[in-house]
Amino acid sequence: MIPFGTVECERLSVLATAFVLALWAGGFAAGGSEKIVVTNNCPITLWIHFTEMPYTADINGGKAQKMLPNTTLVYDSLPDFGAGRCWAYYKDPGTAVNKYAPISSYNGFVEMTVSGGAKGVQNYNVSFVDYATLPVKVVGAGNCVATIVPVSFAEMKSQLKNGCPTQVDDYIDSLGIGRCLGSYDYCVQPGYDTGNIYCNKMKLAYGYDGLAIYGGSFGGASQSFYDSIAGWQRGTFAGDADSTDYYLGPEQDAKGKWVKPYNHFAKWVHKDLDAEVYAFANDDHQNQSGFQACPNSGELDITWCPCEGTSLEQGKFTPILRLQNEKFMRYALFAPNGKTVRSGIAASMEEVSRALSGRLSQGVYFLALYGRDGVLAASKRILVPPQDR
């Protein structure tokens, strides 16, 4: 039997429409949210700051709280609040206080709303719409689905230095951390919307300004139109829910006409970082944003740098990015009894996904990926739910 990994940091974006991630958490917690637990697994000091609209919970009075590496903050007995954000600053923001807005641009953040009482609902997501920076995981306690940026601190440093397709701002050399700008924030710079081909290609293809498309700023537009906007950003058609179709190109035809451009920042977030989080404003169309609604959860857990100290960091698993660069992956899909259901060789995660997209019987499976050296790169439990026939 192969050693089946279950750490979320080994998460693979290879699930076709028939697949759903298995939920392996414990029982439900009772009532609405009463607690937020923040953990700093990063190898650097962070400063944690909560903002709310409207401000009701009074979490640390709108001040940032210093967190050394490998420490945890617990905010207990909290009232309901909406439109909340947890900011993590990687540079000391000083003594500034703000209950409604960030106090420094050197940050990453997650979003949540909390509603207790009879419904006991929490909504949460990770937003990379404006920029991408520190990796993070957020999950409601109980049978709730985690939203995660499944890379280590070191991998994010490498990605910011070598992979960011736009521009890195607020970079600190000594930490190797900054903010890779989202497509809207990149293109909003003076002259970029028309003078930079990254920004202008959307208008050349579809007739709408790149800023409007990247920013999703079409007030009063129909659902179908926003499906089109999401499709354009992914280089596909409106309503396409098959992520293997996304960001494929070519963006231009043989005559150089822009016909299927896509949002390269979104591709970087979803494909290179393997993160199912908001990469543009309408990324929740076709459920690609990682937004979660978690009923009956009494606790929200936020972990900055969730992949530190995992088998990835200990060298037992090689990064998926290495397999992508080698363009070689041996995949195997196993039944719980160890029997091989499917196997083969692929050059990309998209090929693996297509190979697994055929109908499978209801049940639990285990997916494994290996490199050229035969070393297991990652594994994942997969649940195939009952299908409508």
Image: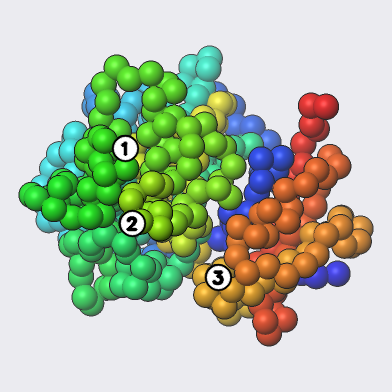
Quarter of the image that includes the N terminus: bottom right
Residue at image position (27%, 73%) is 175
Other residues around mark 1 within 10 Å, as few (<14) / some (14–19) / many (≥20): some
Residue at image position (80%, 43%) is 359
Pick out the residue farthest to the left. Answer: 190
* Residue 85 appears in the rendering: no
Q: Nearer the viewer, residue 269 or 358?
A: 358
The span from disc 3 to disc 1 (Cα, nearest Å) is: 31 Å
* Residue 100 appears in the rendering: yes
The span from disc 2 to disc 3 (Cα, nearest Å) is: 28 Å
Where residue 230 appears, x then y in whole percent? 41, 36
Residue at image position (67%, 82%) is 372
**Mark 1: which secondary structure?**
helix
- The amino acid beneath tag 1 is Tyr
The part of the image, by quadrant, that contains residue 369 is bottom right
In the rendered image of this protein, does residue 88 appear above or below residue 369?
above
- Precedes in sequence: disc 1 or disc 2: 1
Where residue 187 appears, x then y in whole percent? 19, 49
- The amino acid beneath tag 2 is Gly
Where residue 206 appears, x then y in whole percent? 31, 37
Q: Residue 256's mark?
A: 2
Residue annotated with mark 3? 324
Other residues around mark 2 within 10 Å, as few (<14) / some (14–19) / many (≥20): few
